[in-house]
Image: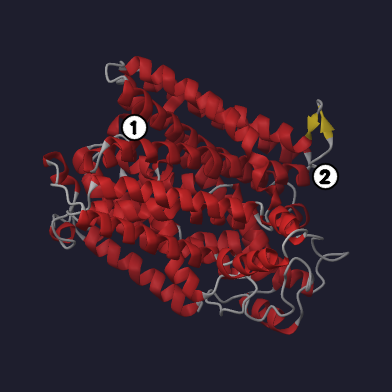
Amino acid sequence: MSGLDWGIIVAYLVGVVGLGVAAGFLRRRGGEGSHYFLAGNTLTWPVIGLAMFAANISTVHLVSLAQTAYQYGLVYGNFEWMAGFTLILLSLFFAPLYLRSRVPTLPDYLERRFNRPCRDVLAIVSLFSAIVIHIGVALYTASWVLCGILEISPSAPIFGLDALMVFIVALGVLTGIYTMLGGLLAVVWTESLQTVLLLVGAVAITIVGYVKVGGWSALSTTLATYPHPLAGQEGIPQSTGNFLSMARSASDPSGLPWYSVLLGYPVLGIWYWCADQTIVQRVLAARDEKQARLGPLFCAFIKILPVFFFVLPGVICVALVQQGYFEGGGPARTADTYTFMLTRMLPTGLKGLVAAAMLAAAMQTCSAALNSSATLFAYDIVKRWRPATTDHRLVVIGKVTTVVATVMAIVISPLFGQYNTIFEGLARLISYVSPPITAVFLFGVFWKKATGRAALLTLSVGGAIGMILFALDFWKGPIATSLGGGSPMLAGAFAWFTHNVIHDFMLLAFYLLVVCCGIMVTVSLFKPEPLKAGARQLVWEDWREPLRGEAHGHALGNYRILSGLVLAAFIILYIVFQ
């Protein structure tokens, strides 16, 4: 890293924090509560689409997708392209209901549709997901890469702390400052800037690698000819011949066969894209229904890019190592893939740009989750129990929540260090959290007979099962060791359970969704409740109803036409990369 590279990084940090603080001063001219938490409901579709993409794309995508691609090929790109289908669902079916009621949070939607206890449960789960899944993972991954760029061991002492923790604290504090001061307006402003920088950096490393490998034909030929440079380590296969395929068989070492993706991703995706406060808050802040519908579809089009700019570089790195491009071979571990490419493939200036893009990815995800945490705590906990709380007081509470959430995320972030890849750890955690919430929102939006009692039981029982499964997965090593020293029969049963049930976490998410749907249907039919008068506008009478409404424009301004184009684009991509 040269002086120019570090200059670019420092200029980025100063610029983005300054922009966030400036948004905070502008915000004070508007209404306190709605402007701080929902940007005064002024967002248009380009900003919504970019902000949703920015809130989703974190350092995990830059680092861990390259890591999984170096290990297994393009298969983990399914998490990017399958998102397009769930974003269509958000645009067509969920967003209109949210905008119709103008709810500030999704737990508020559950209270209006079902009851207050459902709101409380979802608020707690949403706070947990924002702090752990969004902020904690982003801080950990970005700090790990910074250690690699600086060639510092993550455990090296700095100011009495491990280097990894020092970087986690620094990034968390910088992000927390402008998020606390500026609210959602600061978040979407900085996210829009950071998304552009992120894409420029990702495109740079992809183009450089693509040119060096010799183009697509040379890439595919190389992968089909040579063994993997780390074959036999970390579960890496010997052959790389299918690395450019998105659809895999049951025997594939990635653990993502095509049927698991087809059945399991919608469970994770509907929660993440249609019912997670951190992501959907941008839609809730839309100016009108047209903007709320078009924003997710714009985001869906952008989601085509990550496979080519975040996943493909890891595959290109494999081919370059196979071609002998790097002296001394490739990265010693898959976890070092992104840092290896950054420091060895890019010229001076571009290194700083891509490093700044990596920081942008971490900070934009953290700021989005911090603002949603503040919104959830202010509206769904404080306002819920103290309805007379003023808007000014809510903003103060939101700022305090931002600080507390930052501290909690900093403490929790090292949690994901034990997984083979950070992305796998993230996907596994989501697979345990999402099924009950996905079931409740699906039935809440599409079935009038779904009751509050059934929704609460589904959230409670499904959440408890998910927590137990997560605990068994997270501590499976110590549990297996403990059982191995006691009962061989129990040890054998646990080994079978971890290999056949927990191993395929996507399929497990689908099975858990089936259980949650069974609870919803059974309890709703055997313990029926009348639909509340205020809930009639929050559920579709007929699933075709939202497709018959006003299309809000012509050509690409028509959400029905745009949805069809998005659907066709992803189907064609899957046909090409099957």
Find residue 158 and report its image quarter.
top right
- Tell me the SS state at disc 2: loop
Callout 2 crowding tier (Cα within 10 Å): few <14, some 14–19, many ≥20: few
Q: How is the image coloured?
A: secondary structure
Q: In which quarter of the image is residue 383?
A: top left
Mark 2 vs 1: CB contact within 8 A: no
Q: Which of marks 2 and 1 is nearer the N terminus?
A: 1
As drawn, which residue projects farthest toward the left?
533
Q: Which residue is drawn at 82% across and 72% down?
A: 324
Where 306 sits versus 106, above or below? below
238 vs 454, nearest the viewer: 454
Residue 423 can be seen in this image: yes
**Could you say where residue 213 lies in the image, as x and y percent from the top left?**
70, 71
Quadrant where the image shows the N terminus: top right
In the picture, the disc for residue 212 is none
- Residue 330 coordinates in the image, percent (x, y): 80, 64
Q: Mark 1 points at which residue?
A: 38
* Labels in figure, total: 2
Name the amino acid, label 2: Glu
Kind of residue at disc 1: Leu
Q: Nearer the viewer, residue 112 or 76?
A: 112
Q: Which residue is drawn at 34% across and 71% down?
A: 568
**Dot 1 surroundings within 10 Å: few (below 14), some, or many (20 or more)?**
many
Residue 15 or 273: which is nearer the viewer? 273
Q: Name the side, left or right, on which 503 lies relative to 42.
A: right
In this view, the residue in front, 297 or 161, is 161
Q: Position of residue 555 (x, y in %)?
A: 23, 61
Q: Residue 414, position in %: x, y?
A: 68, 41
Q: Residue at horizontal 84%, vertical 37%?
A: 156
Residue at which label 2 appears: 151
